[in-house]
């Protein structure tokens, strides 16, 4: 295999993992735009997506499609309960306090998952077989096509939701100015609740589509969450197009580093990119040019 073909292969692999990073990054952006906080439990939503899907599809032997939507619903409920419980009932609404609540929620979800599912890694079968397809000389796994296709579909649906529905426009209004949204009669608390619910659903989708090409266990959420956060910062924190661009770029750079240098540096690259982005361009690739509290 020539070097150019190897690089093309790495890019395709990077787009696969980058698609899941994009979904995680969008989840971070949704909650940040509604509340101004960083939800460090976002990675646990991804882990729960894989775990619930394994439970419904493998253990309970439900058909794949019902298991898929039941998993999304289940993790969305977890996001809803996080907002309805500790976030909304917190006596202090200081950003730092709320962020620490999400850290505590992450640790709690991780601990409960270890009790429920154990410590052994688990996986899911591919959605449509394991035989690779050939695209311009590079091997592409069928699951990679599912991942990219589902991500495109989710992003398109979100784009329509935010631009074509009244609820989506209300969420955008809250993101633009929470005070102005209150004055115009928009139910801000309901929009915040919806942002946590949608973030849980997005995390579930990422976990479901990623698990067949990797493995999942109770402790994978932390690293996936940090990579999604890095993607959000890289693209422009709070920007949905930025989250998509940051996720795909991070996935490609990570794959190239693993293939051309060493896989030992794959995880470290995400943190290096995060620090570089914060130092040289904290607003991100598609950010507004300044960081602001909304």
Image (cartoon, helix red, strand yellow):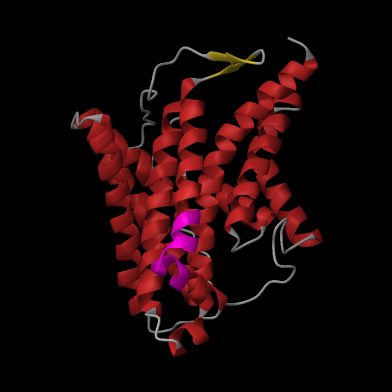
Which residue is at the far top? Answer: 1
Does residue 135 lie above or below 158 as drawn?
above
Q: Quadrant of residue 264?
A: top right
The image shows residue 90 at horizontal and vertical percentages of 37, 79
Residues 223 and 196: in front is 196
- Tell me the quarter of the image containing the N terminus: top right
Residues 169 and 11: in front is 169
Seen at 55% across and 80% down, the residue is 177
Can residue 135 be seen by looking at this rendering?
yes
Does residue 266 lie above or below 161 as drawn?
above
Seen at 43% across and 69% down, the residue is 101
Q: Is residue 115 left or right of residue 102?
A: left
Does residue 110 lie above or below 17 as drawn?
below
Can residue 55 be seen by looking at this rendering?
no
Q: Quadrant of residue 241?
A: bottom right
- Tell me the quarter of the image containing the C terminus: bottom right
């Amino acid at each position: 295999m020539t070097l150019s073909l190897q690089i093309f292969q790495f890019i395709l692999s990077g787009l696969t993992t980058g698609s899941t990073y994009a979904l995680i990054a969008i989840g971070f952006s949704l909650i940040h735009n509604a509340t101004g906080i960083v939800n460090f439990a976002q990675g646990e939503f991804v882990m729960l997506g894989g775990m619930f899907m394994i439970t419904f599809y493998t253990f309970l032997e439900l058909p794949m499609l019902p298991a898929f939507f039941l998993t999304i619903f289940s993790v969305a409920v977890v996001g809803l309960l996080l907002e309805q419980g500790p976030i909304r009932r917190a006596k202090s609404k200081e950003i730092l306090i709320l962020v620490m609540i999400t850290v505590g929620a992450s640790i709690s979800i991780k601990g409960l998952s270890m009790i429920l599912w154990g410590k052994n890694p688990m996986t899911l079968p591919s959605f449509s077989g394991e035989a690779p397809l050939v695209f311009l000389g590079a091997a592409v796994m069928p699951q990679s096509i599912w991942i990219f296709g589902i991500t495109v579909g989710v992003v398109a649906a979100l784009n329509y939701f935010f631009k074509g529905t009244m609820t989506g426009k209300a969420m955008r209004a809250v993101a633009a100015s929470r005070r102005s949204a209150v004055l115009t009669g928009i139910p801000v608390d309901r929009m915040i609740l919806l942002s946590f619910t949608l973030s849980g659903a997005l995390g579930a989708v990422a976990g479901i589509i990623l698990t067949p090409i990797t493995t999942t266990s109770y402790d994978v959420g932390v690293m996936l969450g940090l990579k999604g956060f890095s993607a959000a910062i890289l693209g422009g924190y709070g920007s949905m197009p930025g989250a998509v661009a940051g996720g795909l770029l991070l996935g490609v750079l990570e794959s190239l580093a693993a293939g051309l240098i060493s896989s030992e540096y794959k995880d470290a690259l995400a943190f290096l990119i995060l620090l570089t982005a914060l130092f040289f361009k904290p607003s991100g690739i598609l950010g507004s040019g300044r960081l602001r509290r909304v």
